[in-house]
Image (cartoon, helix red, strand yellow):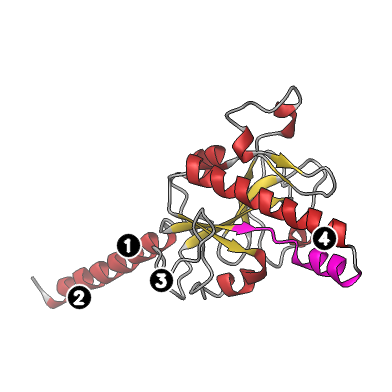
Amino acid sequence: MNLVLKLLLLLFCIESGAACAQYNERNRLPKAVLVMLNTESTRLAYLKQHGYKQKYEKLSADVRKVSLCMRRDFYDNFSLYPVYFFDDTNLNKVKQGNLKGILRNAEGDVLNKTALNDNTTDFFIVYFGYPTMTGVNKERLIKENSDESRTFHDDRGKYLVVCNNRMEQITYVAKRPSEYLLGVPDEVRPYYYVSRTFDLKYWPNAEKLVNELEGMPLDFY
């Protein structure tokens, strides 16, 4: 084999290796799903500061009930990836990969050991709230600095919104609340709660999320 052929073969191997590495990097699957829990910390602080004791106690109870329903739903109905929970007040730390002492299990206990190392970004962030609606035939991905990222509210109801580690929307799924107009089935009741006083609610969506996330890489776009 002459020198030129050897050099061409070496160059081909290097380029192939780089292409494979790039492909593997772009097709990494998440190591876990981090579910963000709504703490209503700002509203609670306001009610406490202004002496609305009864409303404060009611909202605190609603927050606990919604959190419990969401944690139950993921614990019972989502097994695709390990699931951990964190308070929305810790979102900035999570985005930076600072996970130590933040992640909780379904019982609400802080975990000292998880499937994720500190400073990792190999996870999806999921929350129950208003996504950016992008239309049926349009990608649901919303980049952080895009115009659409400033319209994170919609009056068609709340969804499970899936984001990357930078909190950029990837997709969303929902069971519609209209499914419960005739009553909440007994098998759903442990995962369903709607406050009678505040805009605070949760209905089960974790099972539907499984099909949406199966095979979805972290950097699919």
Q: Nearer the viewer, residue 36 or 96?
A: 36
Three-letter residue code for mark 4 = Tyr
**Residue range highlighted in magenta:** 36-50
Label whose residue precedes the other's in the sequence (3 or 2): 2
Is 41 covered by the magenta stretch? yes
* Number of the label disc, if any, that sits on residue 7: 2
Occupied quadrant, residue 163: bottom right
Q: Nearer the viewer, mark 1 or mark 4?
A: 4
- Residue 110 sits above or below residue 140 on the image: below
210 sits left or right of 16 in the view: right
**Mark 1–mark 3 contact, CB under 8 Å?**
no
**Mark 1–mark 4 contact, CB under 8 Å?**
no
Camera sees residue 41:
yes
Alpha carbon of mark 1 to alpha carbon of mark 3: how far?
25 Å
Q: Secondary structure at mark 2?
A: helix
133 sits left or right of 4 in the view: right
Q: Which residue is mark 1?
A: 20
Q: Nearer the viewer, mark 3 or mark 4?
A: 4
Three-letter residue code for mark 1 = Cys
Q: Nearer the viewer, residue 106 or 144?
A: 106
Three-letter residue code for mark 3 = Asn
Is 38 covered by the magenta stretch? yes
Q: Nearer the viewer, mark 1 or mark 3?
A: 3
Label whose residue precedes the other's in the sequence (1 or 4): 1
Q: Residues within 10 Å of mark 1 (few under 14, many from 20)?
A: few
Q: Which residue is mark 4?
A: 56
**Mark 3–mark 4 contact, CB under 8 Å?**
no
Three-letter residue code for mark 2 = Leu
Q: Secondary structure at mark 3?
A: loop
**Residue at the spot x=62%, y=64% of the render?**
87
Q: Which residue is mark 3?
A: 117
